Every structure is written in structure tokens, then in C-alpha cells.
Image (spheres, helix red, strand yellow):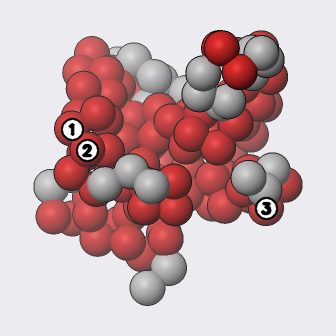
Amino acid sequence: MTKKELALEYHKKGYNCCQAVACSFCKDFGVSEEEMFRISEGFGFGMGMMEVCGALSGLFMIIGLNNSVGDLDKGKSTKADTYRKVKDYAEKFKEKNRSLLCRELKGIGSDRPICSCDQCIADAVDLVEEYLRENPA
């Protein structure tokens, strides 16, 4: 099963969009699925407020897991580089879907949705895979 198929299966089972994306990659980083499920729970449904897309938040979590040094005492902060990468991949997501916001993607206040949750999840997984190819750990 591909990561995209796994993420879509998770979503079908009831995982929120962030959980579906993040849990599809968590084991690649030594994070248990249960732990990632719990960490990412508050980021679904646009952080519960229809703000930044949950699938996109899952993508950001994986970028952080891959890019962060994980300890400021190691002598080097990766924060600025992680922010740059998050911004770059947010732009790529926006190019595909015309928005970063859950409420806009769902069509709240307009006549129709821009993008389904499943499509946002699939696009976020594709972008995670692109990111990991370009930024091996």
C-alpha cells in the first residue's frame, strides 16, 4: 500500500486530515502511530477552527521531523531553515489547491468547495514524498 493509499484509508476510518497525513509517515521517523495520532489530533478541521488545512499541518509536522536537529544544545538551530521549507511547501500546496485555509477549500461562504479533504490529503502526501526525495535525512 502506498503512503497516499494509507493516508486515504486512515481518513476513511475517521482520522482527521492532519492525522491521516502525519500518521502515514510517523514510523519513518521512529514515532509510534498512537503518539502521532495524539499529537496531531488538534490540527484537524483547520485546527478546529477551519483555519490552516489539517492535511497541510500534517505535511508541516513531517518537515519538522525531518529537518529539525531536535536539540538546541547541539549547537545549531534549524528553526529558520524549517520555516523556509514550510513556507516553500505551503506555496506548492497553494499552487495546487488555490488556498491554504480549510474554510476556503471547503467552500464556506461561496457556492462550492475548491478541494475535497481527500484531495488535500493526497496532495499533502505527494508533497511530503517530494520533500523527502529532495531532503533525505
Q: CA distance from mark 2 to mark 1?
A: 5 Å
* CB within 8 Å, label 3 to label 2: no
Graded by Cα atoms within 10 Å as few (under 14), some (14 to 19) or many (20 or more), the crowding at tag 2 reads: few
Q: Is 82 situated left or right of 113 in this image?
A: right
As drawn, 41 above or below 84: below
Q: Which residue is mark 1?
A: 38
Q: Is residue 114 visible?
A: no
Q: Residue at x 48, y 49 (%)?
A: 120
Indicate which disc residue 35 carries.
2
Q: Name the residue type under label 1.
A: Arg
The residue singled out by tag 3 in the image is 133
71, 27: nearer the viewer: 71
Disc on the earlier residue, 1 or 3: 1
Discs 2, 1 touching: Cβ within 8 Å: yes
**Which residue corresponds to the image point at 65% horizontal and 14% vertical from the top-left?**
72
Spot occupied by residue 112 in the image (x, y as percentages of width and height): 39, 38
Query: Could you tell whether 6 is left or right of 65 in the image?
Result: left
| 42 over 5 or under it: above or below | above
Amino acid type at image mark 3: Arg
Q: From the viewer's perspective, tell me whether residue 49 is left or right of residue 2.
A: left
* Residue type beneath disc 2: Glu
